[in-house]
Amino acid sequence: MGFAMNVLEAMAFLFVGVIGLAVAVALVFFVVDRFQTGDAIRRNYPVIGRFRHLFSTLGEFFRQYFFAMDREELPFNRAQREWVKRAGEGHGNTVAFGSTRNLSVVGTPIFANDPFPPLDNQFACTEPMVIGAGVRTPFMAPSFFNISGMSYGAISKPAVQALSRGAKDAGVWLNTGEGGLSPFHLEGGCDVVFQIGTAKFGVRDTDGALSDDKLREVAAHDTVRMFELKLAQGAKPGKGGILPGEKVSAEIAAIRGLNVGQDGISPNRHAEVDDWDDLLDLIGHIREVTGKPVGIKTVMGSEDGMQGFFDTIVRRGADAAPDFITIDGGEGGTGAAPMPLIDLVGMSVREALPLLANMRDAAGLKERVRLVASGKLVNPGDIAWALAAGADFVTSARGFMFSLGCIQALKCNKNTCPTGITTHDPRFQKGLVVQDKYKRVALYAKEIIKEVETIAHSVGVAEPRLMRRRHVRIMQDSGVSVPMNQIYPSVLPAAE
């Protein structure tokens, strides 16, 4: 009996102590909040005002997991992310009962099934496609779906390692992003596209200019198949960037061609390119030095701007043209960019791609210049739409981030990514196990290819690159869908 009384007495003292401590903390917060001048809510509503920030911070979490419907979130909804997750885990992606997608939303693509599709034994896998047939070392690209640019530095070492190994397993290419060629890009043995950004990281001399010796050094790697000259990316067209000197370690400095502790400044454009002729000269120079296909990555701002590029190519001859053009949409992703650029600048890939394909075809360059589509294309329907609209290839960055385990925490720019993908903090990186994640990368790519081929079969063609705009209907605000070839008529009858 005495022991029980002692326990109750101790618990009572503990309870009083906790209440007393809470009151003391509240009094301290009250004084701090009342006399601080930075936050009007906390100054007018001491202590209670602090809950506004707490609930604002937690709101993103609760909306994602509890309140938002499967198709409601941005930039990617739960249904999109879950499809990638199941594909990466090798689980079936069949669903029951019916679609949860609202097909009446304006812009929704609806594929027109054929009444008499090819029989199963008439269904073919997609053939490889050559890029840069006229260069010394052309690239026979095996897959229409590939990994878009993500720099080592923007993403972590284990993330790059998993992407490299997964790309090799799936037979897809891996774009380095503009941060240079790291050993981790090469270790998987996959096909690599080396991206040259405005700072020329990885192929720059001590003054920051393009180095022919460094170009030859990179091109000497057999697995480096192509070079991509980045003019702009969808999330921040017309905007450069800076890698703070405190982040430039000895390893990063060696990969990017900087000094340890030196700020890595990316200008908003290539300093030596003032017009389309300069751009074609630079493309030709890189192609001559490396002997490999050279293309550009850009974002369309208007039809007139890109038309000038093709007019210049026609004037100079097809040999001056880039071997490929990667068209990124204004909805493209990034680790960090100003909100006005993310939200408001750059044409969507849904509009830009068919327009660009028409310009290329009208210039007589369909077999000379390959089109690569990029920008929020992560599920089979996205990729099938792009191929029907005129793309030869599709690349995705965020789709492959989801396959690595990305949960869309929106912390890419804070070095606190909870899945270890966009952080260099060893505490978080240890959660990304390369031996497991590379398999998910490969399975995701393979499942995309398989299901895009299934869509192609359904619309009545033997393989995805035979899909045309007439095979896709686009929902209008009237509630009636219209064939895409009526919205964007092709300049080539065969492309209709």
Image (cartoon, rainbow, N blue to C red):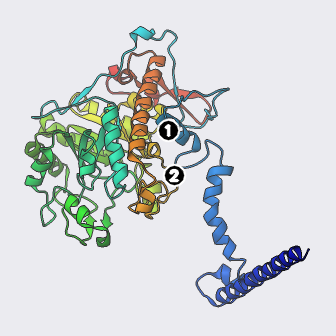
- The x and y percentages for residue 368 are 20, 31
Residue 195 can be seen in this image: yes
Q: Secondary structure at mark 1?
A: helix
- The x and y percentages for residue 224 are 19, 42
Q: Is residue 215 left or right of residue 434?
A: left
Callout 1 amino acid: Val
What residue lies at 45% left-to-right and 39% top-to-bottom?
Answer: 378
Q: Which residue is at the front of the view, 63 or 275?
A: 63
What residue lies at 24% left-to-right and 43% top-to-bottom?
Answer: 193
Specify the quadrant that holds the N terminus. bottom right
What residue lies at 38% left-to-right and 57% top-to-bottom?
Answer: 236
The label on residue 84 is: 1
Q: Earlier in the sequence, mark 2 or mark 1?
A: 1
Callout 2 amino acid: Gln
Q: Is residue 100 left or right of residue 297?
A: right
Specify the quadrant that holds the C terminus. top left
Q: How many C-alpha atoms fall within 10 Å of the one at disc 1: few (<14), some, or many (≥20)? A: many
Question: In the figure, residue 33 lies in which quadrant?
Answer: bottom right
The label on residue 488 is: none
Give the residue number, with chain letter if any, for mark 2: 408
